[in-house]
Amino acid sequence: MKKILCSIGLLLLIMAGCKNTETTEKEMQNLPNLSNQTALILVHGTGGNTDTFDSFSDTFMDDYKVSNERIKLEIGADGQLIYHGVFTKNAKNPIIQIGFEDNIDASIDQQTDWLRIAVKDLANKYNFTKMDGVGHSNGGLVLSTYSQKFAQTKPTLKRLVAIGSPYNDLDEDDNKGDLDFTDVPVTTPLLKSYEDNRDKINPELLVLSIAGDIDDDSFSDDIVPVLSALGSRLIFKDQSKVYLESYYKGPEYDHRTMFADHTIQEHVAWFLYTYKGDHQEINLVNN
């Protein structure tokens, strides 16, 4: 899986642009208490960085106006943190774009541990008590692992969105079937690990899993098979408070850029900031 996803990194690095200036120690003093806000953590996939979700958060701030501030946080391979920006006391649904220094070779477990270091530090600095998470590709796996490994820690993960995340890896033969599947042909060690730890998931968690299909008869987003992306069904359904699925079909739903699609962004914004979480169902949306 790593070798296939490595190619995505080159595209994302080209798209990323320049990084923001590192925040100084003086700027990090006298930070506001944002305990009344829900932080939104954005986690990139293989080859991404702190800039990967720029267009995503731009839309949330400028178009939907569900948030008004964002910062970027790099996590070194040694767990050291580099902040780009600070929140003010006026921050509403503040956004944190996470970037892993080792974004190709590190395991999902290792990235999850690094994310925990970052989240703990954010909580210490801003007093966050709750957060939502959106992850693209392996970023969704990192957040899903976090939902099992750190379910009992603060800040509490309230809502999780996984976009094109390969829960059952990338082999087409392991993921043959249709949208009504109740199991995959071959359960990979990755999916089995998630299934074995289902009971660790917070029963109050709300989950949205999004799969793309570029409509070329591959039944995939050109990287991740639909059944692998919706393998989340075998993990979160009947275990979390709410589990929703969305399936998008069309050439525009390519794995590499689907998180930047405005239709998907609008649906994610609805799930995070409008949906009340008052029922549980699988909700497949065909386009």
Image: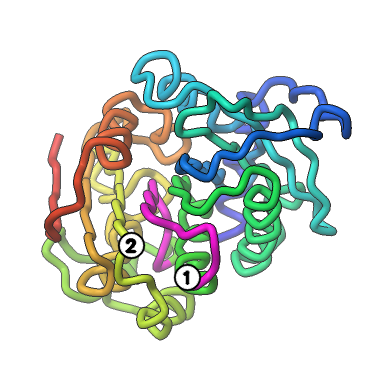
Q: Quadrant of residue 85?
A: top right
Report how far apart the C-alphas of labels 2 and 1 lie in the structure. Answer: 9 Å
Label 1 sits on residue:
151
Locate the N terminus and report the quarter of the image it occupies. Answer: bottom right
Q: Residues within 10 Å of mark 1 (few under 14, many from 20)?
A: some
Element under disc 1: loop
Nearer to me, 59 or 87: 87
Q: Is residue 258 left or right of residue 50?
A: left
Q: Amino acid at mark 2?
A: Leu
Query: Does the magenta-highlighted stretch encompass residue 280?
Result: no
In percent of the image, x 27 and y 41: which residue is there?
271
Are the residues flagged by discs 2 and 1 in contact, CB closer than 8 Å? yes
Residue 85 versus residue 121 in the image, above or below: above
Q: Amino acid at mark 1?
A: Ala
Nearer to me, 45 or 117: 117
Q: Which mark is residue 205?
A: 2
Q: Is residue 229 left or right of residue 129?
A: left
In percent of the image, x 47 and y 45: which residue is there?
136
